[in-house]
Amino acid sequence: QVQLVESGGGLVQPGGSLRLSCAASGSIFFINAMGWYRQGPGKNRELVATSTSAGSTNYADSVKGRFTISRDNAKNTVYLQMNSLKPEDTAVYYCNAAIKTSQFVSVNYWGQGTQVTVSS
């Protein structure tokens, strides 16, 4: 009943930029935290950045100063602006959202993932 649809991945050269988007749709009462995670080749999924409904943000040390997370609450959308990309940023990026589908029910949802490849 709730879907997260990501877009914006692709191939970029080192030092380049990409912007990821994730739109939530469906039976949404309220969205709490939204964020981005990534899973590189042979690695575990790791947190990249999160944003609470109040606007507080948190970043992995490896992306601080290069990535920026933002939200458009009216559109139920979260963005990840990625600058100064490095080959080690290559991964599948997943959107995550903690969504209340009613006053009493909160569910953690994941997007399908979007590939980001940083290579010359």
Image (cartoon, helix red, strand yellow):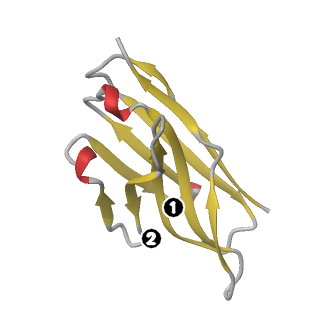
Q: Amino acid at mark 2?
A: Ser
Give the x, y percent position of residue 114. 57, 36
Vertical placement of residue 23 versus 16, above or below = below
Total marks shown come to 2
In the structure shown, which secondary structural element does the residue marked by tag 1 occupy? helix
In the structure shown, which secondary structural element does the residue marked by tag 2 occupy? loop
Give the x, y percent position of residue 90. 41, 31
Vertical placement of residue 76 versus 23, above or below = below
Residue sitting farthest toward the bottom: 104
Residue sitting farthest toward the top: 120
Q: Amino acid at mark 1?
A: Asn
> At 54% from the left edge and 31% from the top edge, which residue is drawn?
115
Q: Which mark is residue 73?
A: 1
**In what quadrant of the picture does the C terminus appear?**
top left
**In what quadrant of the picture does the N terminus appear?**
bottom right
Give the x, y percent position of residue 92. 52, 37
Please indicate whether residue 94 sits to the left or right of residue 89 in the image.
right
Nearest the eye: 52 or 49:
49
Between circles 2 and 1, the one closer to the viewer is 2
- The 10 Å Cα crowd at callout 2, few under 14, some 14 to 19, many 20 or more, is few
Reading the image, the residue beneath label 2 is: 53
- The 10 Å Cα crowd at callout 1, few under 14, some 14 to 19, many 20 or more, is few
Give the x, y percent position of residue 98. 57, 69
User: Are the residues at dot 2 and dot 1 in contact (C-beta closer than 8 Å)?
Assistant: yes
Q: Is residue 64 visible?
A: yes
